[in-house]
Amino acid sequence: MEDLRLDNLSGVGPVTTKKLSDAGIHNIMDLIVRGPVELSEITGMDKDTAGNIVEKARLALVEGGMISKDFVSAAEIYKRRQEIGKITTGTECLDLLLDGGLETQALTEVYGEFGSGKTQFCHTMCVTVQKPKEEGGLDGTVLYIDTENTFRPERIVSIAKAYGMEPEKALDNIIVARAYNSAHQTLILEEASQMIQENNVKLLVVDSAVGLFRSEYLGRGTLSVRQQRLNKFVHLLVRIAETYNCAALATNQVMASPDVFFGDPTRPIGGNVVAHTSTYRIYFKKSGKKRIARMVDSPHHPEQEVIFALSEAGVVDPESDTKKKSTKSIKTPKLETKDTENEISTSDSDTVIDKKIEDNSDT
């Protein structure tokens, strides 16, 4: 943290440092996250000065080995990607879909209709990220930005118990920020950098990312403004994930497209702005009591579907539900025997009654 202080940069004195700190920029990494254009807007600097400061910050991080150089070989990128952390989902099916789990330095977007399991997936990931690395977690904490008041600590308790973890410790490792409007939602994310570093945050959850923007900007007249501000938010989310080496998970709402006559009319909100920014895009949909997850967009994952289920342990493999049902059915063989005996006795009595009726009719 001492090496990342703002006053370590040449040309950044006490006055500039105070101005940056008042704007929510506390270290060199924050300069990279916000960028020269935003830096100019929030501090009142001219764009050239802001650009020079950001460039100095980038060079300092390159020298420190925190970010890559301008020109690197594909072999070096491949080697770096082997060190990227992955958070297990706790299920074999979703881990297969994500090639090992939720990736750090990337934004994973999950969209689907209500009740498809988006929030349950977020709650499960809040617990699995706290597991040690040898068990598929990152031994880190969570920053949960709740925009729809859907975070439930009771679910964290039940999921933690299912994984054999201490519920109180699991709750202590989750920092929840309730966002009340889209501007507040963006502000929380802008001020999150210091909290991410101090608390070893390895998972950043936004549930949902587009809901408040959708409710505030109504009609076609506000569409352009909404997309611009939404674009700023999702790009900030991606830059934070890349800079601080944490995984970003965002849920998204859907709408029904009326011009689709064949196939699935469900479309995610946010348009191309969200679609292009998300590193991985997954579609959750209902299928009876089961759920289907489909990889819609990914730089290297194949487009495939997997089936999962929801239970007290969060998201689970469907095989575990089948095993429970089969176990329950094996436990009750006596009841089935009694039922068959009753059926036999009932059918016998019916035969006797029919015989009496036939005898009476003959007489």
Image: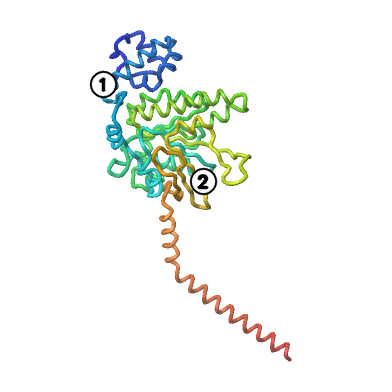
Give 15 or 306, whichever is nearer the viewer: 306
Name the residue beneath numbered marker 2. 285
Q: Secondary structure at mark 2?
A: strand
Measured as percent of width and height from the top left, residue 279 is found at 42, 34
Question: How many tags in the picture?
Answer: 2
User: What amino acid is labelled 2 in the image?
Assistant: Lys
Q: Name above or below for residue 276 compared with residue 33.
A: below
Mark 2 packing: few (<14 Cα in 10 Å), some, or many (20+)? many
User: Is 149 on the left or on the right of 355, as rendered?
Assistant: left
Q: Name above or below for residue 344 compared with residue 193.
A: below
> Residue at coordinates 46% horizontally, 23% vertically from top-left?
187
Q: Please report whichever mark, 1 or 2, sits nearer to the chain's N-terminal start.
A: 1
> Residue at coordinates 43% horizontally, 47% vertically from top-left?
315
Q: Are marks 1 and 2 in contact (CB under 8 Å)?
A: no
Screen quadrant of the C terminus: bottom right
User: What amino acid is labelled 1 in the image?
Assistant: Glu
Q: Quadrant of residue 257?
A: top right
Name the residue beneath numbered marker 1. 63
Measured as percent of width and height from the top left, residue 11 is found at 31, 9
Mark 1 packing: few (<14 Cα in 10 Å), some, or many (20+)? few
Give 172 or 263, whichever is nearer the viewer: 263
Q: From the image, state whether disc 1 or disc 2 is nearer to you.
A: 1
> Residue at coordinates 36% horizontally, 10% vertically from top-left?
16
